[in-house]
Image: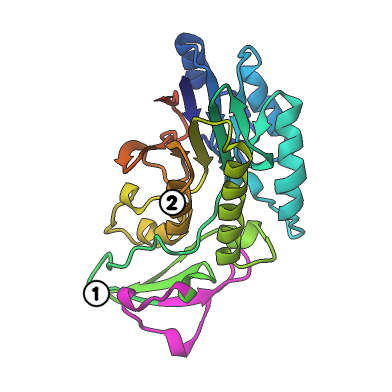
Amino acid sequence: MKILAISDVHLDPDKPAPCQDFIARVQDEEPDVLVVAGDLAVGKSAVYETLLASCDFFTGPKLFVPGNHDLWQLHSKRATWRRYEEELPDAVATVGWQCLDMGPVLLDDVAFVGCMGWYDYSLRQTTSPSAELRVAPAQVTAPGRSMKTSNARANLRWEELTPDDYASKALQVGEDNVMEAVVWNDAFYTDWGRSDGEMTDYFCDKLRTQARQVARRARKLVVVTHFVPFAETLQDYSEVAPAYARAFAGSVKLGQTIQKLPNVVAAVFGHWHRGGQWRLGNLRAYNVSAKNGAGDGTLVQI
């Protein structure tokens, strides 16, 4: 089976032109299945219908899981659950795509299970980008607003940051008397009403439930998530921004859940904008992120 997968295209919602390189490769490769693993764009549902409709010519299964950017609502009234459970699944179904978060898909004896996934800071970078760096977890209420820090958690070494320090999704950084800020924007544009750890557990449970639903019929299992499940696919960084962002890359628990699923042969994901392939125990892992908003996808053969 040939699967052509892509993620993290991040198309401009004001210029929703189809990803021409990907479409051309679909036509050339003639895959059996298409997968979009999240972060297609940010915008109203009609944007997604326009983008995904560009693959109308493809008659095989077309599978989608959302990314965090797909959930973003750029206004103060955020309804993340409605966006996730209703708006996006309805939008992709309108143009012939199936949202894997809503249930598994069985193709002969190959089953696809999937969901967006989430992060719990377990993939955070624990080594400092710079020996001289000093940091302070911060609170910020909106983009462009000033940060608030606590004296109790000020002037820390990077290695002193705890998982709880990442929950505010903002960090004040100082080095050589220069102060800067790094922020993870999900804090402004999503609101689950639950902690990040609780959301990680929610998505892990979803994968286990889907796998049970197809266990008797599936000889092979392919898992699709947006967030990164495996620490082995990441690296340490000497720049502050990507080093901080690693905390929001995904979850060790997500990878452990995937590796325990019966008959799993492949894990497809994106989010971290550095594509690649890895052999991890009994499965192959594929980061299918497009590069700089352009790409022709990754071919996964099982």
Q: Nearer the viewer, mark 1 or mark 2?
A: 2
For badge 1, the amino acid type reads Glu
Task: Name the residue beneath numbered marker 2.
Answer: 255
Residue 106 horizontal side relative to residue 245, left or right: right
Q: Residues within 10 Å of mark 1 (few under 14, many from 20)?
A: few
Asked if residue 58 is positioned above or below residue 126 in the image, the reply reads above
In x, y percent, where is residue 81? 73, 53
Task: Name the residue beneath numbered marker 1.
Answer: 132
Counting residues from the N terminus, which is met first, the one under dot 1 or under dot 2?
Answer: 1
Quarter of the image for residue 13 reads top right
Residue 181 - label: none
Q: Where does the C terminus fall, quadrant-wise?
A: top left
In x, y percent, where is residue 198? 60, 65
Q: What range is drawn magenta here? A: 136-163
Q: Residues within 10 Å of mark 2 (few under 14, many from 20)?
A: some
Callout 1 secondary element? loop
Residue at the location (69% across, 41% down)? 102
In x, y percent, where is residue 73? 69, 51
